Every structure is written in C-alpha cells, then in structure tokens.
Image (spheres, rainbow, N blue to C red):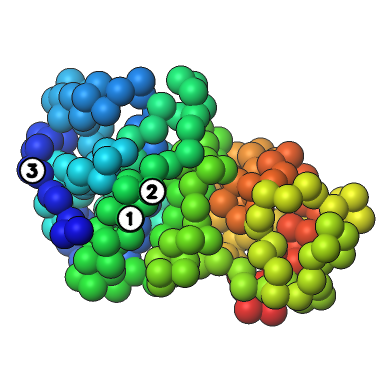
Amino acid sequence: MPLRIVDRSSPNHDTRPQGAAVDMLVVHYTGMKTAEEALTRLCDPQAKVSSHYTIDRDGQVYRHVDEERRAWHAGVSWWAGERNVNARSIGIELVNPGHEFGYIPFAEEQIGALIDLCHGILSRHPIPPERVVAHSDVAPARKEDPGELFPWKHLAEFGIGKWPAKTNPPLEGGGRSAGADPGDRSPTSKSAKQISGRGHAEFLDNLRRYGYGVPPDVDVPPEKIIAAFQRHFRPSCIDGVADDHACAILDALLGR
C-alpha cells in the first residue's frame, strides 16, 4: 500500500544551524492517551514541541515540519559528541500510550509505514545505521521511548538502523549460540556475570565509542545509560547492570 502522508503543520520549528548535516534519525513514542491528543500537542505553539512526522497505529503518517527545518523533538540530548541533536536529526513519533498510560506493542501497519517512511528519509539524507536511535539513547536520564517493545531488529532487517548479528564469544545459556539474536526476549542466561572495576570503565568507554553520552561528557548516572543500551539492544533484561552478555552485544556492534 502506498505511504499515506497528510500535512498537519506545526509552528514549532526553526532554521537548522548553518552547515549542520541531517545525519541522525530519532524514533519516539507519543506517550499520550490518544492520537488526537498527541497531534494537538505537537501542533500547539504553547507546547513548544514537535516532530517531523507522526505515525498513527493504522499506518497514517502526519507531516508536521519540513525535513529541512529543525523540529523540537529531542530536547536536552547527546549522541557521538553532538549536544544539539535536533539540529542534525529527523524526529518520528509513533502513536503509543507509552509506559505512563499503558504501553502496548506497536501495530503491524504502523511499523510498515515507518519502514517505508524511513526508506524515503534515508534516500534523502546520509544517515548511517548507528545514528538511527531511540529517544532514550540520546536522553537516557529523562526518556524511555520508544521502549523495549519497539522492533529494532525488524527494522535492521530492512536496512534501517543497526543490530548485532552475532556475538563473539558466543553467548552461553538459554540455547544461545554465535549467530543467535543477542537481544531477543528469552529469559536472561544465569551464566551472565556482572563486570566491575576496570571492565566496567571499559564498557562505558565502549558505549562512548558507539555514540552514547557517558560521564564526564554528560551528567547522567551510568546505570541509566546502560539501561538505555539494554532497552534498545537487549530488551529481555533492563537492569542497568553491565555484564558479559552486554559486553558481547556491544563488541558485536563495534565490529569486534
């Protein structure tokens, strides 16, 4: 089915800084009770928030801000040294009540429309896979969206974003093996061991290499940053604890 885009303009946007390339895509959920409530807020000049697009659960896409303009969706944020994420990104909202109002799985039609929309965006802007991120990735102290039910692996199968294809060494326990999906929702292996000391510092440094903001660059507790990483790449376990399972996933993302 062709992508259905309806213009519902928001006044909440401004000019991107001169020379700022559009090289990020940030996925959100609306976190409001209804689609209409979310659309009204995104287009309310008093709210001072917006996104470039919103996708309803039936696959209807609403365009709020032209891609060449800066929408106000990420807020205080950080990714790969960039503090002004809005300046370089496209923001997409997915209608979902979120954790506050009854978090539910995203609809098939909604994700299908998202894939089609992202393919168009990626054809227009040089956005590498590691810069297709969650709102929680760029603002882990404040945000959880789009959350652990968002199908990142499915998007990666369509060339949108990054997903660790395998881990090295292979993950043990729970029938996992090299090439298994390291971020599935099967029970966490009890063989995973928490890392500490130098290993923990190295894990945080590797998170920084991937793009996450970590102290002293940002004033965010490490457990919040680790939880954001888990929510994106290991939704079966979001405890903010770095263990050998998390290390294997991060090494795979870094191509090790």
Q: Which structural element holds mark 2?
A: helix
Question: Circle 1 is placed at which residue position?
Answer: 112
Looking at the image, which residue is at 10% across and 44% down? 6
Q: Is residue 222 visible?
A: no
Using residue 158 as the reference point, say whether residue 48 is left or right of it. Answer: left
Q: Decide: marks 1, 3 in contact (CB < 8 A)?
A: no
Q: Label 1 to label 2, Cα distance in Å?
A: 6 Å
Question: Circle 2 is placed at which residue position?
Answer: 108
Looking at the rendered structure, the kind of residue marked 3 is Asp
Q: Which structural element holds mark 3?
A: strand
Looking at the rendered structure, the kind of residue marked 2 is Glu
Using residue 241 as the reference point, say whether residue 90 is left or right of it. Answer: left
**Of tags 2 and 3, which is closer to the observer?**
2
The location of residue 39, given as percent across then percent down, is: 21, 29
Q: Label 1 to label 3, Cα distance in Å?
A: 19 Å
Tell me which label, 1 or 3, sits earlier in the chain.
3
